[in-house]
Amino acid sequence: MNAPLKITKVGNSAGLILPKEVLAHLNAAVGENLTVVFTTRGIELSAADPDFDQQMAAARDVMARRKRALRELAK
């Protein structure tokens, strides 16, 4: 699919209207969150991983408990 998307004003921000084909490809629906990653070619949109926040909380916990070991490994 190669269709132009129009940027519209939403309050003080800007927004894009995604066609239903794009939402279906992302396996996303209205009201859900998307993840944006900046790449060398532009941006990449993907459906937000529901486990991401839980995984990040676990990683932060390990980093806090093993701060000294991680500092040594970074040398």
Image: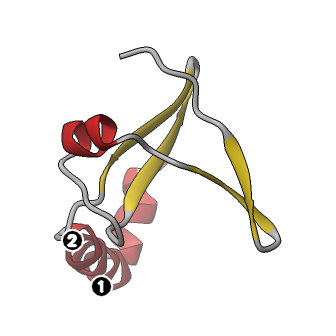
Question: Which label number is shown at residue 55?
Answer: 2
Q: State the image quarter where residue 50 is shown.
A: bottom left
Mark 1 → mark 2, Cα distance in angstroms: 16 Å
Check disc 1 and give the amino acid type: Arg
- Extreme right residue here? 12
Q: Is residue 46 above or below residue 66?
A: above
Q: Is residue 66 left or right of residue 42?
A: left
Q: Is residue 42 left or right of residue 9?
A: left
Q: Is residue 35 above or below residue 2?
A: below
Helix, strand or loop for disc 2: helix
Q: Callout 2: 10 Å neighbours few (<14), some, many (20+)?
A: few
User: What residue sits 57% from the left and 24% below the top?
Assistant: 4
Helix, strand or loop for disc 1: helix
Q: Is residue 69 left or right of residue 9?
A: left
Q: Is residue 27 above or below residue 68?
A: above
Q: Are marks 1 and 2 in contact (CB under 8 Å)?
A: no
User: What residue sits 25% from the left and 43% below the top?
Assistant: 26
User: What residue sits 30% from the left and 43% below the top?
Assistant: 20
Between marks 1 and 2 in the image, the one whose residue lies nearer the viewer: 2
For this rendering, which residue is in front, 39 or 17? 17
Question: Which label number is shown at residue 65?
Answer: 1
Q: Callout 1: 10 Å neighbours few (<14), some, many (20+)?
A: few
* Image coordinates for residue 41, horizontal then vertical, percent: 56, 17
Check disc 2 and give the amino acid type: Gln
Q: Quadrant for the N terminus, please.
A: top left
For this rendering, which residue is in front, 54 or 45? 45
* Image coordinates for residue 54, horizontal then vertical, percent: 21, 78
